[in-house]
Each structure stands twice: as C-alpha cells, then as structure tokens.
Image (cartoon, rainbow, N blue to C red):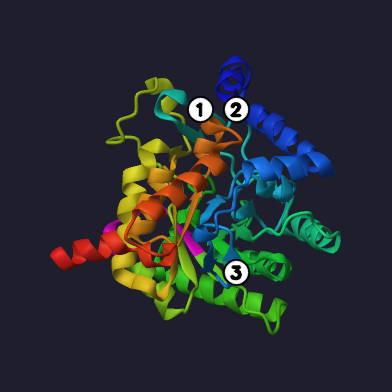
Amino acid sequence: MYRLLFDLLLRRLDPERAHHLAFGWIRALARVPVLRTFAAALLAPRDPALRVEALGRRMHGPFGLAAGFDKNAVGIDGLTMLGFDHVEIGTVTARPQPGNPPRRLFRLVADRALINRMGFNNEGSAAVAGRLAARAAGRPPFRAVVGVNIGKTKAVPEEEAVADYVTSAERLAPHADYLVVNVSSPNTPGLRNLQAAEQLRPLLAAVRAAADRAVPGRHVPLLVKIAPDLADADVDAVADLAVELALDGIIATNTTIAREGLGLRADAALTGEGGGLSGAPLRQRSLEVLRRLYARVGDRLTLVGVGGVESAEDAWERILAGATLVQGYSAFVYEGPLWARRVHRGLAAHLAASPYATLADAVGADTRKADAAA
C-alpha cells in the first residue's frame, strides 16, 4: 500500500514537501486517542526479548529514528506510535535559523538514498525546550526515550562555537534522555573542523559541564556523532577522547560527502548535488567505522550504529559489530510507516535463531571473533 502511495504521489512531490505532508499525517493520527491506540497496537509490536538497557534508560528495543526527521520535537508521540524505540530530535541550534535555501533535499531512488543540504533548519533551542517541557507536563500518551541532537548556529563564528553549544545544552538537557553533540554535518561551514581532537576536547568538556549544571543530581548521557569520512586514525582519536572524557557513547555515522566508490546508479547531475549523502550506499563505510570503534573501546561506551540501515538484517549486523542501539532515517522514506514494525519483528527472529540469550550478549560478537582470529 505505501509503495503504491509513494510511486503515485509522494515520489512526484518535492522531497521536502512530501516530508512535511507525510509527517503531518503522522502527527494528525497521533492526536486522536482511539486511532493512535489502534495504530500503536498494530505498528509497535513489543517483543520482551528485545528489551535493552542503554544510556540509563530501559527501552522496548534497540531501533530508533535518527536525528533529522523531527527537527523541532513536534511529532515525538506519532513517531513512537509507529514503533521507534527511541526518537532523536534535532539537530537543534542555539538560535533559530531557516537553513539553506531550497531546493535542499534530493531523492536518489535508484540507490535508495538521499542527499540533503538542509543546514540545520530549526526553531532554536529555546522554542524546542519549551515544547519538550510542555509535552512532559501534558502527560504524553506514550513513554518515549527522547534524544536531543545539538549543533552550531551557522551565524556563530567557529571561535564562539563552544558557547553556542553550551547555550543549547543548558536549555535542552533538562528535557533530554540523552544529548548528542553533532560536529559531523557537512552542511554548516567549518562544523566538521570541530571533530579534530584539539577542538573537540574543550567543546565536549564544556557541554558536559553545562548539562551537569542544568540538571543537578541527574546524569544526562552525552554522546558525539561523527562523520564516515574521518580517516581511521581520526576515528581512533575520537574514540580515545570519548573514553578520556568519560562520554557515554558515540554515534557512527552521519552523512557522507563522498560520491566515488559507492556504486551510485542515479543520474550524475543528481549525485553531484552538494550536501550529505545518506541511505544504502553508506552502509559499508558506517559499518567499518562502527567495527573500528568497538575494537577500540569495547563495552566502555554505548555505540549507536546508523547509516545505510534498511532492514532487520542490517540492524542485526550492526549489533553483532558492536552497536547497542541502531538508528535509521533514509529508509523510512522508502519503506513507510510499517518499517519499524518489520525491523522489530525481524530482529526478534534473528535473536531467536542465534546462540545468544539476549541482545546484550550479541553486541560486538562478530567484531570480537574477527579480532581473535586476526
């Protein structure tokens, strides 16, 4: 049914307009109590075998929606209704900003991929914090694990980036189950420079201190999201820094600026659009980065695998490589509202057929075997 809707309607619309239309339907459904209860029962199966504990939270399963879909925390309940075990909102910046001018989102249908150069379009951390506070005060219909992804305001110079991130952290930490420092989007000039260890160290330390000040007595887990385009030595440096600073985790990976070597089949004019590429072509490099991180940090950090995750098989592969949690986004565009349900059920089948009693037992199993054999 969704494939027909996609082919007949959504595919013919500008991708950003189609996103707003589909997201509007999800939010509208979630506002009707009887309909959202029915939809959640149908779309959000909860197999007890998939329950995980991560980042200080108990979750129904490991599969969540990556940042970028819900930038302003307007549809958390609708997305939870569809079966996502956690929802990461954002990227949120300290100041509101419109992002880059349209067109800024492109579908590579032949490659099951997207290119975006959105530019962190969002309403700003004060507005998003207010919305999260109002949701919590209003007794939301679903218990949702909500991550908040924060980035740098475009107008803020690089030398003032730390203060910009701190402002967002202070506002949003009280409402977040975890915080993510995004230094890996290719669509904010100079942002990826902050991944260098000498710049990343003071940034992460300042955000950690800001979150602690904002929420005294509660540890808000802090993660950093990195690019797939980092050299292996730089991946190792970020991993070592995360352990040194006692971060809670790393998200691997963001979108890529690479185009060569990905086997892209879409028209060259389309693949040549500027911005970050996500979806199926990113799968192998994201998996390589994840395996490298797990080999470096083991169980000392929570690793989140994202990038090219389309199916339960992909999610299971990430878990065996070292991911405690798995996220997706681009495949949501192509798979529709039943996607999280299919991944959840497929993961339960993989776990039942495996030698592992729990998902926690499976995390990193393949990477450990590969290291032992090397």
Q: Spatial distance from mark 1 to mark 2, Cα to Cα?
A: 7 Å
Q: Position of residue 46 (x, y in %)?
A: 59, 53
Is residue 228 visible in the rendered image? The answer is no
Q: Residues within 10 Å of mark 2 (few under 14, many from 20)?
A: some
Is residue 341 visible in the rendered image? The answer is yes
Q: Is residue 207 above or below residue 250?
A: below
Asked where in the image residue 10 lies, by quadrant, the reply is: top right
Circle 1 sits on which residue? 107
In the current view of this chain or complex, which residue is farthest to the left?
374
Q: Position of residue 166 (x, y in %)?
A: 64, 69
Q: Is residue 222 above or below residue 129?
A: below
Q: Is residue 188 left or right of residue 230?
A: right
Circle 2 sits on which residue? 15
Q: Residues in magenta?
A: 224-233
> In front: 17, or 56?
56
**Picture residue at 80% right of the left edge, 56% below the top:** 140
Q: Is residue 63 magenta?
A: no
**Picture residue at 49% right of the left edge, 64% below the top:** 224
Circle 3 sits on which residue? 57
Report the amino acid beneath label 2. Answer: Pro
Report the amino acid beneath label 3. Answer: Arg
Q: Position of residue 205 (x, y in %)?
A: 53, 77
Mark 1 or mark 2: name the one nearer the start of the chain: 2
Report the amino acid beneath label 1. Answer: Arg
Marks 1,2: beta carbons within 8 A = yes
Q: Is residue 126 left or right of residue 109?
A: right
In the current view of this chain or complex, which residue is farthest to the right?
138
Q: Spatial distance from mark 3 to mark 2, Cα to Cα?
A: 34 Å
> In front: 87, or 231?
87
